[in-house]
Amino acid sequence: MENNFDKAPENESTIQGTPYDYMSLMHYGQDFFSNGNGHTIITKDPRFQDVIGQHYDLSPIDAFELNNLYKCNSSISFLDHCSFCNNTCQMATCSSSANGWKMVSNASGGPLSDHSDLGPSFFMHFSMKAGQEGDSGRLVSKEMTPRRDCHVQCLQFFYYHSGNETDRLNIWIREYQSDTDTIGTLRLMDQITGPSTNHWKLRHVPLNADKPFLVEFEARKGAGYSRGGFSVDDINLSESECPHNVWQIRNFMELWNKSAPGTYIFSPAYYSPDGYRYQVFLRLNQNSFSIYVRLVSGVYDDQLQWPCPWRQVTFLLLDQNPDIQQRMSNEASLTTDPTLTYDGTHFWGKPSDVGYLTVVNGNELVNVTTGMGYFIFMEKARLTDREFVKGGDLILLFSMQDVSGLKESNSLPCPRVAVKDFNISSSLGAQKGSCIAR
């Protein structure tokens, strides 16, 4: 085994002029090739002794080395990022009233800190405390051009809603149809309204721009008294499909530490894009937690194919680093095999045929199948390797994707973005163009 620690000369191996990277995906762990009599690697910096050997993702330095080696000078999927640490990242603002989006470090009514660092940094806030119903303000991204064949983008951001339940945060895209188009075409892609959240929440908005476009966050004051407003932070935009569902677990470490080993916690029940219903659950062990998925009876079951064929379920424990390019999330997946059987029945069969009765979402009686997943998905000691828990919250992202097409082809069709129907029109100011003339 000693040959695994041979030193390689520079003419055989290079680190592309980068500093030593304890977080590299290629780094051995502290006990790799051990005979059981102690660590095989002792880090010069003791802070990284328990960190080396991570298998989450490429580290930022790994990505830099690969890009440098293969002469890649730009990302094929990354479009934009802003955490408002020192500036607004070329984002423009405009308002129909005296109130408008402002870069602040805290806001009356909440939040008291940003999400990026949960400290004295900055975020964007639109106050609803004063003004009239209908007052609005826009926070507008720079113009971007789609580059990939699949015209699908994912907008991800954290928001804090401390206003009235009638206040709204509208997410628009403005597409320019030609080089001479100075107004653009507005489409409403998402809307946040309802009861206040009083904590930072993650939001994904699927987009489908196929021409040069920009994103507009429009805060609009509703009726009645508002003690706060809307805030946004850690905005990321990429040319990729959004995860299908988000499970944000509040005060996760407090929950884990108070729970007996073997305690189960359950997500809400979700629907996949093609109608299969499923639920994810965690088993809190002494030093790690397990993750499993099970099928749940749903309203579309009589229209679906059973046993559930070739759906890839992806679990992703989000590294909440503000910059998507710096994240190293923990990810695993499994695929439903329609031929798999257990105790004489199809494992991924129709829940009403092969499952058992239980309650989901607090009070809904449904049929569920047996779960499948990973007994050790994340070790407790490694939760501090990255920003897996932030502000007490742990965030899991899930997708359930139809990969049956790979049985006949080497690629999958482009994902489709579901069009949402909102009964709302753009403001008069927005109809005249963006905040900055094109």
Image (cartoon, rainbow, N blue to C red):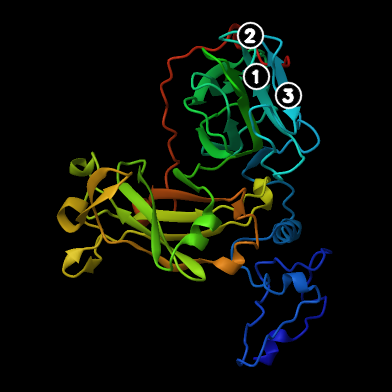
- Please give left or right for residue 59 compared with residue 366 in the image: right
> What number is the disc on residue 138?
1
> Which amino acid, by three-letter code, is at mark 1?
Arg
For label 2, count other residues whose C-alpha is less than 10 Å away and answer few (under 14), some (14-19) or many (20+): some
Q: Is residue 212 visible?
A: no
Q: Where residue 238 appears, x then y in whole percent?
A: 60, 40
* Residue designated by label 2: 429
Quadrant location of the N terminus? Answer: bottom right
Identify whether 403 is placed above or below 196: below
Q: Disc 2 versus disc 1: distance between alpha carbons?
A: 10 Å
- Helix, strand or loop at mark 2: helix
- Report which quarter residue 225 is drawn in: top right
- Report which quarter residue 118 is drawn in: top right
> Which amino acid, by three-letter code, is at mark 2?
Gly
Q: Disc 1 versus disc 3: distance between alpha carbons?
A: 11 Å
N-terminal of the two: label 3 or label 2?
A: 3
Q: Residue at x 72, y 82 (%)?
A: 41
Q: Where residue 52 appears, x then y in whole percent?
A: 68, 72
Contact between labelled residues 1 and 2, with CB atoms less than 8 Å apart = yes
> Which amino acid, by three-letter code, is at mark 3?
Lys
* Residue designated by label 3: 102
- Helix, strand or loop at mark 3: strand
For label 1, count other residues whose C-alpha is less than 10 Å away and answer few (under 14), some (14-19) or many (20+): many
